Image (cartoon, helix red, strand yellow):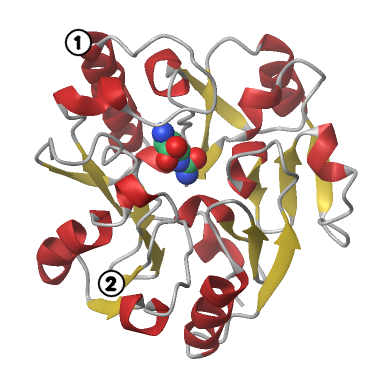
Amino acid sequence: MLGAQAYQFNHALTRSPAKSVIDGLRAGDGPNPVFSHFQSQHQAYQKALEDAGLTVNCLAADEDFPDSVFVEDPALCIGGSVILLSPGAPSRYGEAGRLAAHGQRYFDTLIDLRPRLAAGGRIDGGDILLTGREALIGLSARTNQAGFDALAAVLQDFSIIARPLETPADILHFKSDCGLLDAETIFCTERLAKSDCFKGYRVITAPAGDEPAANLIRVNDWVLLAHGHPRSAEILDYHGYQVKLLDISEAAKIDGGLSCMSLRYHRQ
Ligand code: CIR
């Protein structure tokens, strides 16, 4: 049972975008991000985390991995523990190993899931939504059943039940289309809501056309929302959430959102 732990944090780990970020993976054949804009948007993102009360530690850019700015995918944090995962895209396989080198410094405990995934299990942090009561894990092109099984076993040690769900085929990550607003409330797209995966939760849906807004993050008293979706901002404001807008247009060019640019956690 996570309760408010699912959105109350005092630390975040980020990684500076590498110049190679312009070669980041993307589903379509859209334009490359502009590196200097990516850098300034990343800095503003970190500042928003600090303003929400977090100590932000930023790792140096890693040119070997164009998508390494998206630190959420190779790891999952529970309290002050970090669990190293095994991302599903071949160009990202090595990212968890690069994080391992920093684990002892920034976290209380490091659990390496990779040996349990050696037979081909894959799981991306972007497919894992921790709510107040469980871990919802979307099976996707990046996360398979073996990855789910390995993580579910480890989560039992934290008394967290993991529930497997299907990520609709045209969605990169489960969390591309949803975010936690509080322990019991989820903001998500219509297409994800209609899969009925959030039964028992209070669900607020993003208006049609606002799909990229669904990947918001609740951080302490703030909800960070991608800039450019005024109707979503209004809806959240109406429901009493304190919203901060962030321009992440460069990350969006390579299918990145707000959740994936940090690991947020709570150290005692
Ligand atoms: C990728 O395709 O892996 C990156 N270009 C984007 C990753 C976004 N991560 C996330 O939504 N958790």
- Residue 267 drawn above or below residue 32: below
- Residue 51 drawn above or below residue 147: above
Q: Earlier in the sequence, mark 2 or mark 1?
A: 1
The residue most toward the bottom is: 157
Which numbered disc, 2 or 1, marks the residue closer to the eye?
1
Q: Is disc 2's CB within 8 Å of ligand 1?
A: no
- Label number found at residue 83: none
Residue at (56, 54) in percent of width and height:
127
Q: In which quarter of the image is the N terminus?
A: bottom right
Q: How many labels does the image show?
A: 2
Residue 120 picture quarter? bottom left
Q: Mark 2 points at which residue?
A: 268
Q: Quadrant of the C terminus?
A: bottom left
Going by the numbered disc 2, the residue's amino acid type is: Gln
Q: Name the residue under label 1.
A: 36
Residue 180, image x, y percentages: 63, 48
Which quadrant of the render holds ligand 1?
top left
Residue 57, image x, y percentages: 17, 46
Q: In the image, 17: left or right of 117?
A: left
Residue 255, image x, y percentages: 49, 28
